[in-house]
Amino acid sequence: MRRNISMLIDENTPNWLASLVMDGILGGVGGVVVFVPLMLYLYFFLAILEESGYMSRVAFLMDKIMTKLGLNGKAFVPMVLGFGCTVPAIYATRTLEDESSRRLTAAMAPFMSCGARLPVYGLFTAAFFGAKAGMVVMSLYVLGIVVAILTGLVLKNFEMFKAEGRALLIELPPYRVPSLRVIVKSTLTRTGSYLKKATTIIMGMLMILWALTYFPNNGDTANSYMAKFGKTFQGVLKPTGFADRWETVAAIPPSLAAKEIVVGFMAQVLVGDKDAQEIEDEVNHETTFIEDTVDQLAGLGVAIKDSIVGVVSLDVKGLFSVPDESEIEEEGSGVVAATKMLWTDELAPLRAYSFMVFILLVVPCVVTLGAIKQEFGYKFTGFIIGMLLVVPYIVSTLVFQIGKLFF
């Protein structure tokens, strides 16, 4: 699709305008649309659980455990969804009747390590941890859960998050076969609401990030405003251990668009642009709209097949698997080798781990922020952004400073 639209941009089109259309606007649309299948799956299966009568039983079974965090049993579902994607986790808080519980659940859900962070883990574990990559990634998942629990225990003492303390009174309806018509209608209505209300803020944020990465040197990322940001805030983030390199600091703002962007950003600033022959090959390899569509459908089919196989096989080990080096290298030739050279001292693995911890806990993507704004308003969104800047700074600093004692 991007190739076909690029044909409409002729040689007289200013570079900044072409980049705005291709990377800013199309990238923004893609950032929203890519979540539509996920939202459809979420709302479809939530509707099945609701209509079948099982959702009430999950809430009842988990209520005793969740009460210790100041939540009720219904909060368990959004927390679990957070491991796949934080966006549906935020929307799933609608199942909670208590507004304080909804806010507390929404504040804890971003600490669950979503799938978008895996490419970042894959890059840095491949560069610094080798065969221990799986254990390192598992420790990040566990750390996210621990931080979420500690955050919940602190926040539940504040008025805005303090639940009413009532016992969970819930009707346990009999199991029944859900109506397909009701399920489809509920799924389409909820997904349509997501697209209608989330698009504006997401598009705006992504275009701002594009401008910061493109200017003032017309796409020269290493000398962009984003790079200047990284060099400016190196001193502030120095206690975290990874900020002795401006590249890792500058990679944090682009992660607001999507956490996977960190890998592409690293490829740009560490490896550089592709050589002329690679660019010429890509330009000469024109495709039609039908061919692009077939490629997209084929990719969707592979993704669906892999998802079904993963669910049926109950591959628990696969939960902590990361992309291998060959997959990562698709983002940029030599990016793993270049990442290895970020740090060469004995503390290099600790610095890399501290950076991954920061990416794990820092402000989630703009799609998630759009969902939080839609559900809870600007004031609460501002609170979440502030909290998710302070918490990763504290935790990454503790990880690095304490870790140094063992190196």
Image: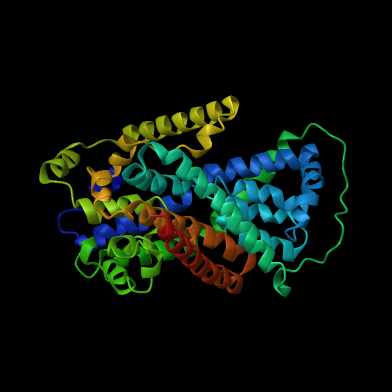
Residue 212, placed above or below residue 33: below
- Give the camera-side residue of 249 and 134: 134
Q: Quadrant of residue 345?
A: bottom left
Residue 238 point in image, percent of width and height: 36, 69
User: Which residue is at 32% across, 70% downward?
Assistant: 234
Q: Is residue 247 left or right of residue 169?
A: left
Q: Is residue 219 left or right of residue 289?
A: left
Residue 221 point in image, percent of width and height: 24, 61
Residue 102 point in image, percent of width and height: 70, 61
- Give the camera-side residue of 94 and 144: 144
Q: Quadrant of residue 291?
A: top left
Total labels: the figure holds 0
Residue 294, placed above or below residue 379: above
Residue extending farthest left: 276
Q: Assign the C terminus to one quadrant of the image.
A: bottom left
Residue extending farthest front: 406
Q: Assign the N terminus to one quadrant of the image.
A: top left
User: Which residue is at 22% across, 62% downward?
Assistant: 222
Residue 347 seen by the camera:
yes
Residue 21 point in image, percent of width and height: 31, 57
Q: Quadrant of residue 270?
A: bottom left
User: Which residue is at 49% across, 67% downward?
Assistant: 394
How is the model colour-coded?
Answer: rainbow
